[in-house]
Each structure stands twice: as C-alpha cells, then as structure tokens.
Amino acid sequence: MAGALGVVLLALSTRYGYHRDELYFRVAGQNLDWGYPDQPPLLPLLTRAITELFGDALFVQRLPAALLSAAGVVVAALTARELGGHRRAQLLTAGAYTVCPFVSATGHAFYTATLDLFVSTALVWLAVRWVRTRDQRLLLGIGVVAAVAVNVKYLAVFLLAALVAGLVISGPRDFARRPMLLAGALIAGAAAVPGLLWQARHGWPQLEMADQIAAEGDFGGRPGFIPFQLLLTGVVLSWLWIYGLWRLFRSRELAPYRFLGYGYLLLTALFLVTAGKPYYLAGLWAALWAAGAVEVERRGAPRGAGWTITVPAYVFTGISTVLLTLPVYPVGMLADTPQPVINADTAETVGWPRFAAEVARVHRALPAAERARATIVTSNYGEAGALDRYGPELGLPRAYSGHNGYWYFGRPADTGGPTIFIGPEGDAGLRRFWTDVTAAGRIDNGVDLDNEEQGKSVWVCRGQRMPWTALWPQLRHLS
C-alpha cells in the first residue's frame, strides 16, 4: 500500500506546476532565518537543502512529499500493531491512510502540512508504543520527534499538550516520573528556542497570523469543522476513526490508550474555540483508524457497517480520492471538473509560466529608460515566488511582496522608476502611493480556470509619493 501510494504520487508529481506555497518556500530557503511570520524554519531549510543537493526541479522538490506520505502508511499500520492489531487490523488501518483524501492532497506537493502530518503521526505512534512497552528510550525519541515537529509547525505544541493531558486524565500517569521524559522535554524545548526568540524580536507575528486564519474561516469555519473532517478522511471510511474514538472509551482492551480519545476531544474543543482548521487534528487520525480497526478485528464490524471495510469500499474511496485531489485531468478540462471546488489547491498549481510571461510583456513595453529602473511588486508570496522562478529567463528584475514572510526578504530600492504592481482589482488603493496608475495587462491562465490569479490586473504605477522606507511598512500584510 505504501509503495502504491508513493508510485501514484511520484507519477503525477510534475503534472500542472508549482503550488504557491512551494514557490514561497523556494525563496524563503534563499533567505534562511530562525523563523518566519507564518511558520518555523525547517521547511524552507529543507527546500534549500534539496535544491542545493539535487537541483531546482519540481520532481525533486516533491519527492520528499511522496516518500513521507508512503512512510505514513507504514507508521499507521505500526500504530495498529501497538494497539494489539494483527494482520487484518493493520491492513484496514494502512488502507484507510492510503486512500485518505487529505494524505493524497498533501502528498502531491511539499507543504508544511505534508511534513506536519507525518511527524505528528509518528509522534502519536511513539506515545502509543511507550504505553505498551514502557521503554524509557521512547520518551527520548518522542522528544527528538517533537523537536522536529515544533520546527515544522508551532501547533505541534498543542498536540503534545493534548497527549500529556490525556495521560494525566486516564493514565498511565507514571510517565511523569521517568527521567527520560525530562531529557526529551529539554531537547524539544531547546529546539523551539531559536524560533521563539525570532518571534519575540519581531513582535510575535505568528499570533497575528493565527487571528487572520481564524478570520478567514476556511473549511466552513466552526460549523464546517466536523463535516470537513469527514470529507478529508474519506466519507465512507470516516466511520472507522469515529468508531475507534468511541471504542477507546468503551473497550477494556483499549483502556490503556484512552488518552488518545481524550487528546482528540481536547484538541477538538480547542480548535473549535479558536476557529482552527479541521486538518489540525490529522496527526491523530491514524491512531483513531487503528483503534477502530483493532476493534473490528476483535469483535467484527458493527451491524450495517461491514460493507465499509470491504475491498470494493476501499477501492471506491481510493478512486474518488485520486479524481478529486490529484492532477489526473488534462489541464484544459480541469475547470469543468469538480476538483477545483473540492481541492482548491489544485487550481493554484496552474498558470504560473503564463503569469510570469504577462508580467514580462508589461515590463518589455516600458520605455527603455524606465525599464532599467522598474520595480515589480506583487500582492502575494506565490506571485513573487513565481517571478523568482520564471522571471530571470524572461529578463525580469527581482520581485517584491509585502505578504507574510516575503515582506521580511527586503524592500525595493528607490530607483525613481515606475513600479509594476500585480494584484489589486482597482486603482484606488494604489493611488494612495502613486500619482499615475495605469492598467497595462491582465492575468489569464489560458484554460479559463478560476484561481486566485485569474483576471488580476497588472498596473504600471508612476509618481511615487514617498520613499520605499515609508511605503514598505504600509504594504505588509498577513493571510
């Protein structure tokens, strides 16, 4: 199953193009720091290392995503084994992970969520294994994995806290007396210090970022929190982790692992209150699938649910997952399929070369004297990252953006030339900063696909009202 998932992801890895986040990580990797306003430092560092060692190619950048997703299948099966599951339980768990829509979607591109899903799943597996074996070395291992996790996503702290709270509530509570726990905690804490210091020096932008995420209300906001978990885990197979959650509180054999159920409930309450995203709980899904699969193996499926754990049900879920999350359609047909609605990230991988070409056309149309002094500014980091990737071969200068971490990568120089600005729907906002604003182009991905860039205007702005030192802070924004 792991091999099949990995092969499918690798085979489809270079269809369409980069996702905006991948373009952002490329540039963040060229501007390494101990932190960013929207994430810890590890993923940009890994992207930089991959690029330096193996080249700047889309397939190479996405190879880790496929490998981590495939490895997650194995870790999910190992979690079922630790819970007492034999062959059938392990296969049911591995199968649920393999055909999970969220796993495929995050395994196609190298996002923060890709690495976070694997590391969180491994963290939960180690906790389950410690409960079964009481091997103190596992507590040290948890600390090492937690050190990685907090440098992928700060939300890992909440998963760790939920697991600890679950152990305090339901036991086994003797973990607190183990010397290796302190050693593991020190490792994880030391690994988090550089990122926390960066956040403190820059006014804790991650907190502002969290407020922005909550305000955006992605995945239906609070009302959609539970329903979208069903969609992200595969509607047919979502019952298995729900059954596992229920059996964690009912089964005598699973009583030692009840902390998983409490951990899930505590995180659900937290993210409902804070308007978090449903996939913030993804690190626990494998363990819940495993608990459900183990109980099915021991007692059989509940009445009426047996058909959901048959091979046809898994095959159906797998096929629908591929059709709804992976780039299997000819790009010209994509707009006519349900995939851009179900998985909007797919639409964000289309059109970047044409985007760069349109900006280059506007740049070439400038008088020679202006062209030499022109500045390019974009409304988001994906657009700036696309120009970093495709712009040099088109003769474009460096692009700047005030979006998220890109704002910290430097401001434009005061050249006295025009600014090509990509993004705003109207010119009213731009006229605050320039006296002469003219629409000079429009972005078109060529396949009539409604994504974030489609239809945006390319503006030429002249008569800058203030130097960049004063203007740049006003362009900073998080989302």
Image: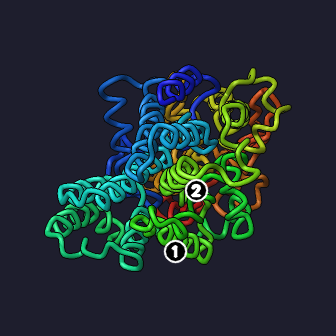
Q: Quadrant of residue 131?
A: bottom left
Residue in the image at 35% along x and 37% along y: 48
Side (left or right) of 217 relative to 291 = right
* Depth order, front residue of 285/385: 285
Q: Residue at x 67, y 36 (%)?
A: 310
Residue drawn at x 44%, y 42% is 86
**Furthest residue to the right?**
336
Q: Are marks 2 and 1 in contact (CB under 8 Å)?
A: no
Give the CA separation, mark 2 to mark 1: 15 Å
Identify the disc placed on residue 266: 1
Q: As displayed, is residue 162 above or below residue 399?
A: below
Give the quarter of the figure containing the C terminus: bottom right
**Pointer 2: what residue?**
279
Q: Residues within 10 Å of mark 1 (few under 14, many from 20)?
A: some
Quadrant hosting residue 129: bottom left
Q: Is residue 222 above or below residue 348?
A: below
